Image (cartoon, helix red, strand yellow):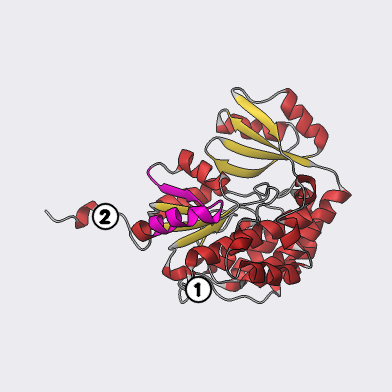
Amino acid sequence: MLAIVCPGQGSQSPGLLAPWLELDGAAEQVATHSEAAGLDLAAHGTTSDAETIRDTAVAQPLIVSTSLVALRALLDGRPAEDVADVTAGHSVGELAAAAVAGVLDDAGAVGLVSARARFMADAAAAAPSGMAAVVGGDPDEVLTAIEAAGLWPANVNGGGQVVAAGAHDALERLAAAPPARARVIPLQVAGAFHTPFMQPAMERFAPVAQDWVAQDPRLTLLSNADGAPYARITGDAGLEHGAATDVLARLGAQVVAPVRWDLCQQTLVELGVTGLVELAPAGVLTGLARRSLPGVETVAVKTPEDLTAARDLISRHAGTRPVDPEETPA
């Protein structure tokens, strides 16, 4: 059983689009994405420096565009539902995953994420804040320390990693008195995403998302809110993979809610996933999978050179499921 996962903010690096633009049709895809975003994504993905693409308003559409260019190269004209069994994305990667699942078309995903990014950037500028990764330590002690410092657990990633977010002075308090056996690592992001600091962004983004053109998912799509497939969320037994309206509503609300990637990974295990492909700019989610999903084979698609390995993994894992011992012939 195969999962395609999509990375979140912080995965970008200067020049990330350059190798992809050498592929046939990629420049045209990025031009379409740029029009939807109102940004020159080709320039940002090839010549802009690290500080420029750290800007939330640039980073989010650039990451989603790169993921979708990699997706189309990987699929090579095939529908995603013929290749993948389940998809999920971390934070802004949820919008790329929604495109993998067919909820959004590629340009629509980039356009919607551009609105999200602008609103989040405005909220971050209005109330300075930040984020820090807390690595190691006892999970309960880590959450207690984050709360005691006046912060929120913005990302619960599994594999011994929680991202704390909030005001800069609170982050300094946490760094000065970290939980036992844990390290606090400041992150180069512009604000406390997935916390109440983003309430102004959510109030602007949710109505936009609610009215966005969308289709019901065509394959299993997981929610960052609780790791559940939308088929469990929709309440409509007639929809095999859930409803577009539910996806859009959760994408709007998720701006202020924690990313529960630990629960997404737990669901991948429950579903019987045996292979996982992370779309560009890849590396973070496959790293978490290696710590949290033992026995699951992974490929990080960082450049077009990784497509052969990813297609090989797909050929061996897509459409399969674990054998139930009760079904094994005697």
Q: CA distance from mark 2 to mark 1?
A: 29 Å
Residue 292 place in picture, x, y as percent: 47, 41
- Work out whether mark 2 precedes mark 1 in sequence or the reverse, and give the earlier one: 1
Q: Nearer the viewer, residue 56 or 228?
A: 56
**What segment is highlighted magenta in the picture?**
295-314
Mark 1 residue type = Asp
Q: Residue at x 36, y 63 (%)?
A: 319
Left or right, 271 with respect to 59, comes to left
Q: Can you tell which quarter of the image residue 206 is in?
A: bottom right
Residue 196 place in picture, x, y as percent: 76, 49
Q: What is the residue that sits farthest to the left in this orientation?
A: 330
Membership of 296 in magenta stretch: yes
Membership of 310 in magenta stretch: yes
Q: Looking at the image, is 330 positioned above or below residue 290?
A: below
Q: What is the residue that sits farthest to the right in this orientation?
A: 126
Tag in front: 2 or 1: 2
Q: Can you tell which quarter of the image residue 321 is in?
A: bottom left
Task: Say which residue label 2 marks.
Answer: 323
Task: Say which residue label 1 marks.
Answer: 236
Residue 112 place in picture, x, y as percent: 71, 67
Image quadrant holding the N terminus, namely bottom left
Q: Can you tell which quarter of the image residue 149 is in?
A: top right
Q: Is residue 121 visible?
A: yes
Left or right, 199 with respect to 70, comes to right
Mark 2 residue type = Val
Instruction: Report crowding for label 2: few under 14, some 14 to 19, many 20 or more residues within 10 A (C-alpha).
Output: few
Q: Give the SS element for disc 1.
A: loop
Q: Residue at x 63, y 45 (%)?
A: 155
Q: Residue at x 11, y 53 (%)?
A: 330
Q: Residue at x 40, y 47 (%)?
A: 296
Q: Give the SS element for disc 2.
A: loop
Per the rendering, the mark at residue 203 is: none
